Amino acid sequence: MNFISDPVAFIADLLAKLLFRIGLSQIQVTVVSEFIGAFLLGVFGFSLVIFTIWLERKLYGRIQDRIGPNRVGPWGIFQTFPDMIKIFTKEYITPVGADKIVYNLAPILSVSAVLLTWAVIPFAPTIVGTDLNVGVIYLMAVGSIGALGIILAGWSSNNKYSLIGAFRAVAQVVSYEVPMILALLIPVLLGQSMGVNSLVYAQKVWFIFLAPVAAFIFFTSCMAETGRAPFDLLEAESEIVAGYQTEYSGLKFGMFYVGEFLHAFTISALVATLFLGGWRGPWAQQVPILGVAWFFMKTFLVYFVVVLIRISMPRLRIDQMLNFNWKFLTPLALVMLIVTAFVEKGFLLISPDLGLTDSALPWVRAGVHLFSNLVVVLITIQILKSHRIKAVRVVAKPRPVAVAPEPPASVIS
Amino acid sequence: MSTDLLVWLLPLPPLLAFFLIILLTNRYKAFSHSIAIGAALLSWLGSMVVFFRAINTEHLNLNPFSSAINWIPTGDTWLQVGIWVDPLTAVTLFFVSWTVLMIFIYSVGYHNYGQPQGEHDQKGLQPHGASIADEHGHKHIVPSIEPMYSRFFAFIGLFAFGMYTLVVSDNLLTLFIGWEIMGLCSYLLIGFWYQKPTARAAMIKAFLTTRVGDVFMLLGIAYLYTAIGSLSFSDIFKPETLHILAQTPALGGFLGLSAAGLIGILLFFGTVGKSAQWPLHVWLPDAMEGPTPVSAMIHAATMVSAGVYLVIRMFPLLQAGSVHGQLTPPMMLMTIIGAFTAIFAATIAIAQNDIKRVLAYSTISQLGYMIAALGIGAYVAAAFHLVTHAFFKALLFLGSGSVIHGVEHGVLHTGENVDPQDMFNMGGLRKKMPITFWTFLIGGLALSGFPLITAGFWSKDEILADAFGHGHWVVFIILALAALLTAFYTMRQITLTFLGNPRTKSAEHAQETHWTMTLPLIILGVFAIALGWSGISESFPLIGGILPNFVHEFVGSTLAEFPEALPFSVWPLLVSILVSLGGLTAGWLVYRNQKVGAEDPLKRALGPVYTVLKNKYYFDELYNIIFVRPAYWMADTFTNQILDRKIIDGILHFIARIASSVGGILRNYFDKPIVNGFGDFVGEGVKKVGRNLKIIQTGRVQQYLIMALILAFGAMFFFVFTSLQH
Amino acid sequence: MIPLSWYLTFAAILFCIGLYGVLVRKNAIAILMSIELMLNSVIINLISFWRYRAPEGISGQAFAIVVFAVAAAEVSVGLALIISIYRRRKSVVAEDMNLMKW
Amino acid sequence: MTAQQIIFLVVAAVTLIAGISVVTSRNLIHSALWLILTLAGVAVFYVLLNAGFFAVIQVVVYIGAIAILFIFAVMLTRRVMQDTGPQSNSYWWLGALIALLLFAGIALIFTNWQGFKALPPVMLDQSGKLVQLGLSLVSPDKYLLPFELASVLLVAGMIGAIYVAGEKKQ
């Protein structure tokens, strides 16, 4: 096994041989190496945050027709470090009456939730944290822990704004989990497995082509999950100061901040792996390193879209947000799940007597699924249009014309 | 039509008439009397046909017209009912049908058919006459029609049905049924004018006294049935059954009588009741309260003669066991009672003033004659006298009816308040009512036995000859005396009513009655004379052989062994002629110039005996004392006061007291303390338990859970330990 | 290798703790939490029995899944009830809810 | 003592302590948090029992949904309790006694049960287990009925909850 084909394994073996020489028993060796692997992944996550913060601020500038940070280091790439230092030096203020334990526990939970998702995402065919066969549901479980963190933060800081922020967060996060799971189920259905890596393997044809609607639903619900862009009611500055983060300061606030950014990047990684084929690309099988490159390219592409949306979209009202979820996303996700399942079953029954060559089979299947998706989209558009007309008709009722009151007789004469 | 069927149909027309009148034509007088007379005519015609066929058949008694049907199932055999016509029945049919028809016709006139309705005539009272205005305006009171006109005809129709069934029946049971129907009709007809208290008393008296006789008769019939298992005459008169009955001693050796004797006596008591013989005669004179056709029909022709007919019919039974002419105990009893009744009734008759009562007592004495004749074995003579007596007694009664009717007419005319039935208010009706007078005279002479021409003489003479012939001296003397008295009171009656001159104004105004009443009198008159000649015995001097002694051959043949004709002896003939002529002349001499309001010459002659005779030997008062008052006493004081009030009510009250006291005790000592107590105890107990249990229900879920778990663990540990043991 | 007894004792202890909680806690929501504890111990039992008695079959797991569903339903209805009682009685203390009808 | 046993004991200790604190902690939010910790402990146990799917389900269903529901409920009814006074009612000793009694009974039964000390049989291939479970849940002859009934129960629970807790629009 040479370095190029599987660098991670190579390094791992090197490390193992080193430890054996030190004299640790087999169990201890595996424990230590597992621990080192996990530590590396965590550190990698945090370092990414530093880069993404810079990237995002640069993009904000450019979109808002300004340069963005360019003072610290060339093109401002070191801007994040002074921010970090500033936050580290801030004083820890804990509000009076706050529930100390819960107050301190909240930021840890929210950051750890995000980091835990990276354990499952495959960078390359061989480079992956752990290949759980229930990976997809693991992602869901971790998402819910994040929600927990936000609630505790809002609750324990003994502040009305933070409490309201917490309630809004819970409402948003918990209710958007439903369409996210349903959307996740569609790639699982297509890939016939719940392991994330096996899903990537199954993506000979990117799932975005087979289930574009599912991709759209997953992407929007993930956006809501992070509490970014159009759905950033969690810490809507204009309304509730910083939402659940108001009472936090110093490193705790930093943790939240980092958690949020990393979460944005994570969801783009998820979208990339689940719908854009993750590390799939030419020669990725042969040279794992290439897989990593493909993976990061796709992730940054999706991330760019996320940032774009974040800047351009106005904030939604809470009822609009909930209605959008319960009245549009969830039903659409359910319909899509059912349609995909039927089409998939139908295709499986018909495919043998179609006489397709092995290579053409996935493409035909993709076409069929694409077609079903398009049909569903058209139907939804029609429904929306009729719904809108009805709404308009209601609105369009003529308002009674204002008539000046009749002057009393005495005045006229 | 075969004679059997004809005989079956004989009784039906009167019955149909009865129902038709009662149910349908009660309101229409003309319609109902025509139905009744039509029915009587039909039965009369049937009887005549049967009579002539019976005469023309030889040895009728060997093969009589008879047929029987099964009526009541008695186990495996049937009680048979049917008809039986032998010479005796034929002869009885003859006189019954004639007299019934005559009386039906007579009743039309008697009840003033065609007269106007009386203004204040009431149902149940004699009509009081109606006032009508003739052409020149002054008022007349005219006899008014009987308000219950059709009802009368219905009852006599039913009576005729009863008589016919009795006559034609072939067994004692239907005979008894006919007997009872006649009893009922006599009751209804005596009390026809039921508003009169005397009529009501008379009808009850008649019914009860005949009822006494009927009870004994029924006992006799029952005993007979138990003895030989059948009631029909053909079975009874078989020689061997008669022999058995004669030999077997009566049940319990009653007075040493044989079965036949006892049955005979019991049946005879029925006749004593029905034909008003000595002990049970009291009802017949009082029965005169009924209208005269009733008295004529019931108390002269048919009903009373039914009693004698029964005895004649059962003669072989009564005679069973007598050896060469010696009288059996029932015959002995009959002779005694018959003879005594004859002389007894005759003595009372001479002291009566009411025209109908005289005839009533004369009927009783004549019946006594017949019973006495049967008693001494003069079977043919008794039958012959029965027939002739029926005719001239019916004639006399109807005659007295028309006399009363005429005098009543006079009473209404003059408005005089006088009793139309009392002979001393009459007199001199010879000129006013010639037809009634002559027919009444013929009847009277026949009754008293005027020699040679009247039928009465031949039949009575026969009886006296028999008595004389068979050496029954005592009977002969008594009967001769009775005949003397009969002749005397008959002549008394005729002279008081018809001869002399009228003693009251109403007698002066008496008028001859309507033809419907006088025609029957004439017809009966003819029979009263002509019938005698059919029974002249051959050995009679001079005119003996001219006409065959038809009665002797024909009626005699009903008996098993033919009774031989007696050799003629002059003594009984002389005695009877002497007796009748003597009586007649004596009667005429005594009463020929009876003045208005004068006393009865006999009163002076007999003195106290006269009053005794007038009051009928005080038998009514005697019976009143012996039977009626004790019965009342029994009913009122004994049963009501003592038995009912004191004893039964006493017992009941006692029981009631005991019951209430027991109830009280139970209530106080058992019900209240124990039962209620237990009830309350349960109630309180439940409440207490409820109060204690209440505290468990705290409403706290966790406490419930703890309790549940404790119990569960208890159970668990128990099972675990037990399972651990083994 | 871990014997079955460890799992069963652990589940029993957890169950008893849950039972104690249910019997003792004043607050209705605390009671519900204890019930959750008891349900979890049940599921542990189920899975351990599956693992130790019949690993080749899947009935144990199916059973567990159904218990999961029931637990979820139970909690949701329980909390809904408690909230409606709270809204009516302004109290969540189990002892206050001692009347069948207010 | 193998690695697994060590992990088992550590996690068991942690979970039990969390369980006890759930039951005894004065602050309701803290008891909710302790509950979450116990649930996580139980999830680890599932992993030890080679039932990975259940661990994840446990996290998603219990921690993700039910725990949050609890916290919600606590928040909604916070005003009353104000964490005042003793959290457990007067006869807590009785509860403790019964719990111990129950434990003694169960222990008694376990000791008598011969399969108590059983060692885990060797697990063959694990991969097909999840698919087999999924299929069994939906195949009619296996566990379709309980699965459907559970779903009906959930829907009923949901509707009931909404109806009971929802604001009655007058």
Image (cartoon, coloured by chain):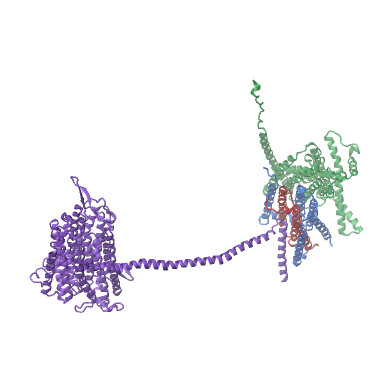
Q: Is residue D40 above or below residue B666?
A: above
Q: Nearer the viewer, residue C35 or A12?
A: C35
The answer, for residue A351, to whether it is visible in the render is no
Q: Quadrant of the C terminus of chain A?
A: top right
Q: Position of residue D42 (x, y in %)?
A: 78, 56
Q: Position of residue B244 (x, y in %)?
A: 26, 78
Q: Is residue A162 above or below residue B552?
A: above
Q: Is residue B644 above or below residue B149?
A: below
Q: Quadrant of residue B332?
A: bottom left
- Chain letter for the green colouring in the rendering: A
Left or right of residue C36: residue A68: right
- Chain letter for the red colouring in the rendering: C
Q: Report the number of numbered marks.
A: 0
- Chain letter for the blue colouring in the rendering: D
Q: Nearer the viewer, residue A45 or A101?
A: A101
Q: Quadrant of residue B83?
A: bottom left
Q: Position of residue B67 (x, y in %)?
A: 24, 67
The answer, for residue B258, to whether it is visible in the render is yes
Q: Position of residue B374 (x, y in %)?
A: 20, 72
Left or right of residue D74: residue B54: left
**Residue sticking out furthest to the top:** A413
Left or right of residue D90: residue B366: left
Left or right of residue A381: residue D88: right
Give the colour in which the image draws chain B: purple
Q: Residue at x 86, y 56 (%)?
A: A31
